[in-house]
Amino acid sequence: MIRTVLVANRGEIARRVFRACRLLGLKTVAVYSEADREAPHVRDADEAVAIGGAPARESYLNADRILEAAGHAGADAIHPGYGFLSENWRFADAVERARIVFIGPRPEAIRKMGDKIEARRLMAAAGVPVLPGSFEPVADVGAAEAVAREVGFPVFLKAAAGGGGIGMARVDKPADLASAFATATRRAQAAFGTAELYIERCLERPRHVEVQVFGDGTGQVVHLHERECSIQRRHQKLVEESPAPNLPGPSKAGLTAAAVAGARAISYTNAGTMEFLVDEGGGFYFLEMNARLQVEHPVTEEVTGLDLVVAQIRVAAGEPLPWRQSEVVQHRAAIECRVYAEDPSKGFLPSPGTVQKLELPSGEGIRIESGVEVGSTVSVHYDPLLLKLIAHGATRQRAVERMADALDQCVVEGVRTTIPFLRRVIASGEFRGGRVHTQLLEQGAFNA
Amino acid sequence: MPEEIKAHITGVVFQVTTKPGDRVAAGDAVIVLESMKMEIPVEAPRAGAVKEIKVQEGQTVQEGDVVAVLE
């Protein structure tokens, strides 16, 4: 039985989880850093506990302080949101040891999927297609070159403890391998505390398509269909939609079946996402699994009409999955645009500051998930996501039109934002025609 | 002529990658800032020797602050 939920996060996702808690009649507890004393998520909760300084490692990454706050507030469950401690299996384990419910997958599943090499091995063993590459860490440049020559250049060097594109390096030819290996090793060590790297073949013009999965304690696993997330900068998503336009039927069927098989193979519980690359021939390959709620989960909610966060809480409390596979239907189309405090005219450089003006669209088919309001400080210490715009419609075209209108109505002043870039994406022939891939942005397809 | 190198963005000093006396080429990172989870190098505008580093790791700098000086 869950009565009080602490959200170990900030911004729009903390507010989103609090909303689900209110629907279920649960008491809510916010935690906040010194920088977030006045933040909207703090006011949204029934109770708020200060957990430390502005740098994330002193607060939102400080597991001990968060557990103390949970004890102090009498929370019997913790939702980690995304980012911060959400995919830290030691945190999930510490929460369970404190006899608090972790609203997410089991620590063991987080650990397995957090080691990207082990994830590749486990998924390959479960029959999920993976990219050609190494199934062991590559110890040195020589080992890396041997694997790269076998799978064929270009390749990606990736951090075994990585994910989300951090510490990834594309290598086009053997001569570039030594310096790329040194850089990737240094970055992996700095970002993740371990320098282990692995290699995957690099596809040209792939699409990023992912499948939302959900499992419960009885061993049931369903999928909630796919999301197309190819519009990215720095390997991080800016626009997501569902259904994925122009995805061949056999690819879609294969992706969802593989996602469910992969999740079953690790007895996955709660919400998770299996990420894939889809090549120009419709072939698909496992990239990684995000063992948490995704930023873009509202796309799936708008398409299916289901509440993923409510289901997360119920399943974490021990209830079975609230839906059978046949009940999870793509009723309509939905698109999400991420509004970041970044300057698209300067290579998406961060743009910290204070939100001076905020005008948000509203109306039929529009949903907003915002972590900021007028007067909010956008700090250098955290991810620059300000808010998400989600538009849905009976058809993709209707959703696209609504998104275009929503972006036109959206005004944010005080910090630079990705809005001008998002307008160009939604207006582009590539996006309108559903002909997207992950390299469009670097090819300049959306330049002003 | 000594030349000041200024931060082009507000952030926290993530790494000081050079020290006084180091020779740098145009475009080399003199320090690396961290802002909003991104590492952003502050680059030397021209070749030269580093005369002075004005910041320490962990320090917050504002856009326009001088972080280093070239000889």
Image: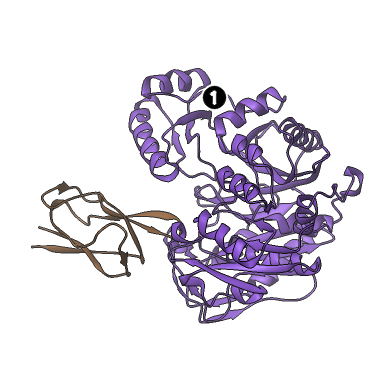
Chain colours: A purple, B brown
Residue A433 appears at what percent x and percent y? 70, 51
Count of marks, rendered view: 1
**In the image, is residue A348 above or below residue B19?**
below
Residue type, numbered disc 1 = Gly
Name the residue at 33% across, 33% down. A179
Question: Which part of the image, by quadrant, shows the C terminus of chain B?
Answer: bottom left
Is residue A41 shown to the viewer in this render? no
**Residue at the image position 46 percent from the left and 59 percent from the top:** A56
Residue A218 percent location from the top left of the image: 83, 39
- Viewed as shown, does residue A81 lie left or right of B13? right
The percent position of residue A87, horizontal first and vertical second, equals 59, 46
Drawn side of residue A291 relative to residue A235, left or right: right
Query: In this orientation, does residue A174 appear?
Result: yes
Residue toward you, B60 or B70: B60
Q: Position of residue B20 (x, y in %)?
A: 13, 53
**Quadrant in which the N terminus of chain B appears:** bottom left
Q: Residue at x 73, y 69 (%)?
A: A27
Q: On the image, numbered disc 1 is attached to which residue? A: A133
- Answer above or below: position of A281 versus A68: above
Q: Identify which residue, A118 or B10, lies in the foreground.
A: A118
Left or right position of A404 against A232: right
Q: In the rendered structure, the residue with mark 1 lies on which chain?
A: A
Question: Which element type, helix, strand or loop, lies under badge 1?
Answer: loop
A34 or A114: nearer the viewer: A34
For disc 1, the neighbor class at 10 Å (few under 14, some 14 to 19, many from 20) is many
